[in-house]
Image (cartoon, rainbow, N blue to C red):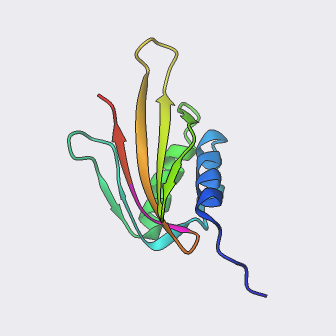
């Protein structure tokens, strides 16, 4: 029996859980081989990661980092694109946080593209 592809909502829920729970293993079968990530930093252009292994490594590094706290907000879905807002905290200080959004394109139950942006 062939497993049906995950819905975009299922992919986003599992992606967010990986960061919230600091469990990079939740990302392992969510990322397509042709995935491309455009990261939020370093400014102004960010970093680009190409290919499934590179994208998995980058996100696993972030998701596994216990010093970071990601809070997500409900994503808006338009076709194959999820607009997924979040807040990232790295400390208890007044300025130890940033608000951002990821634009995540999903095809056949896997992430093929992600672009991250932050409010400055």
Quarter of the image with the C terminus in it: top left
| Residue most extreme to the bottom | 1
Query: In the drawing, does residue 4 fall left or right of residue 59?
Result: right
Front residue of 15/5: it is 5
**Most prominent secondary structure in the magenta stretch?**
strand
Front residue of 92/7: it is 7
Query: In the drawing, does residue 110 fall left or right of residue 34?
Result: right
Residue 4: name its quadrant: bottom right
| Residue most extreme to the right | 1
Give the image location of residue 66, x and y in percent. Answer: 59, 35
Total labels drawn: 0
Front residue of 26/99: it is 99
Give the image location of residue 86, x and y in percent. Answer: 49, 37
Quarter of the image with the N terminus in it: bottom right
> Which residue shows up at 62% across the image and 49% down it?
18
Give the image location of residue 38, x and y in percent. Answer: 33, 54
- The boundaries of the magenta stretch are 110-114
> Which residue shows up at 55% across the image and 39% down it?
65
Residue 100: name its quadrant: top left
> Which residue shows up at 44% across the image and 61% down it?
55
Q: Is residue 72 above or below residue 54?
A: above
> Which residue shows up at 48% across the image and 65% down it?
80
| Residue most extreme to the left | 44
Q: Is residue 112 magenta?
A: yes
């Amino acid at each position: 029996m062939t497993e049906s592809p995950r819905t975009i909502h299922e992919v986003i829920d599992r992606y967010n859980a990986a960061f919230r729970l600091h469990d990079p293993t939740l990302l392992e079968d969510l990322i397509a081989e042709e995935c491309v990530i455009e990261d939020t930093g370093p400014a102004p252009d960010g970093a680009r990661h190409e290919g499934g292994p590179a994208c998995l490594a980058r996100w696993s590094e972030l998701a596994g980092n216990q010093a970071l706290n990601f809070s997500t907000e409900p994503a808006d879905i338009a076709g194959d694109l999820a607009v997924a807002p979040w807040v990232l905290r790295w400390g208890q200080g007044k300025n130890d946080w940033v608000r951002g959004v990821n634009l995540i394109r999903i095809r056949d139950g896997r992430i093929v593209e992600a672009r991250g942006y932050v409010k400055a």
